[in-house]
Amino acid sequence: MLMIPGFLGIPYDFRWSVLWESPHGQWILNGLLNTIKIGAVSWIFAILLGILFGALRTSPFRPLRAIATAYVEFFRNVPLLVWLFFWYFGAPEVFPEGIRQWLIHHGMEFWSGVAGISVYHGARMAEIIRAGIQSIPKTQTEAGLSSGLSIFETYRFIIIPIALRLIVPPLTNDSLGLLKNTSLAMTIGVAELTFATRQIETYTAKAFEAFTAGTLIYLVLCLSISFVLNRMESRFAIPGLIARTERPEH
Amino acid sequence: MNFDWAAIISNAKFLLVQGLLGIGIFGGGTLRLAIPAILLGFVVGIFLGLARLARRPYIHYPAVLYIELIRGTPLLMVIFWFWFLVPILLRKPVPEYWVALTAFVMFEAAYIGEIVRAGIQSVGRGQVDAATATGLGHLQTMYDVILPQAIRNMIPSLVTQFIILFKDTSLASIIGMMDLTKAAQTVSERDLRPFEMYIFIAVVYWIFTYSMSRFARWLEVRMSPDRAIP
C-alpha cells in the first residue's frame, strides 16, 4: 500500500501522524461514536418496522397486506440517499411548527438520518422476515398440533426456532449493509466516520491516510460483527435440518 | 404548508433529460452511468468470481482479498478512494462521470464475483463427477454442464444486484456528478420546493427499480427447474 503512489513516480509525502494529531484523532473517535450511535438507533427502529410489516405481509386480512406491500415496495425501491434528502430537506416542511422546532433543537440531522435509514432498511428487513415466515411449510404447524402441542407451544417450540434460524443469516447481512449505509448520513451533515475522514482530508490534504483510516475502521467493524454472528449461527444450527452450504454474505 | 406540484412540471424536462438521461451541458445522467456500470461490472465480476474459484493461490488469494476488502467498505468510501486515486493514476484531472463509472464497476464487480462463485458452487459435485465419468473434458464440463445450471441459479441474485447498483448510482451526486438526485438537489435549492422534487425523483427511481424487480420475479418463475422439465 505504502508503495503505490511512490511506485508510480508521483511524489507523495506520507504523514500518518495527521490521524492522531489534535484535533484529528478526536474527530475520528467522535465520528466512530456517531456511526455506532446512528447505526444502533436506526437498527432498532428498522427491526421494529421489519417485524411489524413483515408480519402484516403474511396477514390473512387483505387491506393490511396491501398496506404492508405498498410500504415495502415503495421504500426499498428508492435510493437511500433520496430518502435522506427527503427526510432532511423535504419532510420537515410539512411537519407542524412545534415538531420542527423540537427537531431543530435536538439534532435534526441525526433524526432525519435515523428516519431515512430505518424506514429504508425496515422495508428490506420486512421482506426478509416475510420470506422466513412463509418458508416454513404449513405441515410443520399441523404436525405440532396433531402431536398434542397447543398453538402457543407449536409456535414456541417449532415455528419460531426454525424461523429465527432462517431469518438471522440474511438479517445479519442486511444489518451490516445498514452499518455501511450510515456513511450516507454525512451528506445531511451527521458528523459520522466518513464525514470525519473527509474533514481530515479537507484540512490536511492527506487523502490517502485519512481514507485508509476510515476504510480500516469500517472493515474491522464489519468483520467483527459478522464473525460474532457467524459463530452464533453455527452454534445454533440444527444439524441436518437446514443445510447451509455457504456462509452468509456480509 | 401548501404544495406546488406545478414546480414538478416546470422542472420535469431538466430532471428527466439532464438528470436521468444525461443529455445537456452538465453531462452525467443516471441511465448513462447505470447502464455501462452494470455491463462492465458484470464482465469484471465474472472474472473475479472465476479468479476466486481458481486453485492457483496467486490468483485465488488476491481475488479473495479484493472481494472482502470492497464488501467490508461502504460504497461512499470506495467512491472517495477512486475520486482520489483515478486522477493520480492517470496523472490528469478526470471528469466526475468517469470517476463514478470506475468506482461503480470496481465496487459492483466484487459483489457480482461472489454471486458468480456461489452460482458455480451451487452446481452439485455429482454433476462434475458424472460429466467426467462420461468422458467430457474440463472445458466441455464447464460449458455444457456447469455453466448452464450455474447461470440459471445466478440470475435472480444478479438482477437484484443490478437493481441495487441502479439505486447506488445516486451516490455519484455526492462527488458532484449531475444525475437525477443532483438535478433534484439543484432545482430544489433554487425553487425551494424540496418536498415535491424529492417525491418526484423517488417515483422516477421507483418506476425503474420496480419494473426491474417484476422482471426478476418473472424470470425466476420462468427459469425454475420445475418448468424446464415438461
Image (cartoon, grey):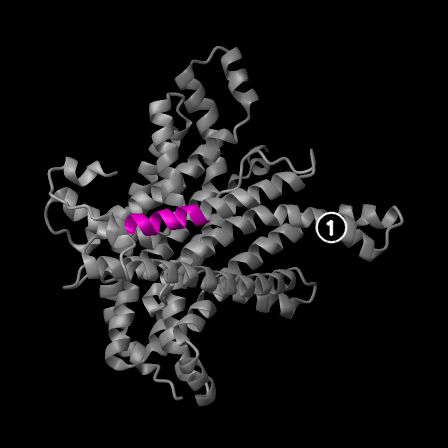
Residue A153 lies, with reference to residue B2, above or below; the image says above
For image coordinates 23% across by 57% down, the residue present is A201
Specify few, some or many for label 1: CA neighbours under 10 Å numbering under 14, 14-19, or 20 or more: some
* Residue range of the region highlighted in magenta in the rendering: A211-221
**Closer to us: A210 or B218:** A210
In the rendered image, the residue lying farthest to the front is A22
* Residue B80 visible from this viewpoint: no
Chain for disc number 1:
A
Residue A130 spot, x, y in % from top left:
61, 55
* Quarter of the image with the N terminus of chain B in it: bottom left
Is A205 drawn above or below residue A237 in the view shown?
A: below
Horizontal and vertical percent for residue A77?
44, 60
Tell me, yes or no, whether the highlighted magenta stretch contains residue A40: no
Residue at the (61%, 55%) spot, across then down: A129
Secondary structure beneath label 1: helix
| Residue under pointer 1 | A159
Residue A159 locus on image (x, y percent): 73, 50
How far from the left and from the top, in percent, is residue A9?
11, 38
Q: Is residue A147 left or right of residue B42?
A: right
When the figure is inspected, residue A112 is found, relative to residue A126, above or below; the finding is below
> Which residue is painted at 55% across and 26% down in the image?
B124
Of the pair B132 and A110, the residue shown nearer to us:
A110
Task: Report the amino acid beneath label 1.
Answer: Ile
Asked where in the image residue B3 lies, by quadrant, the reply is bottom left
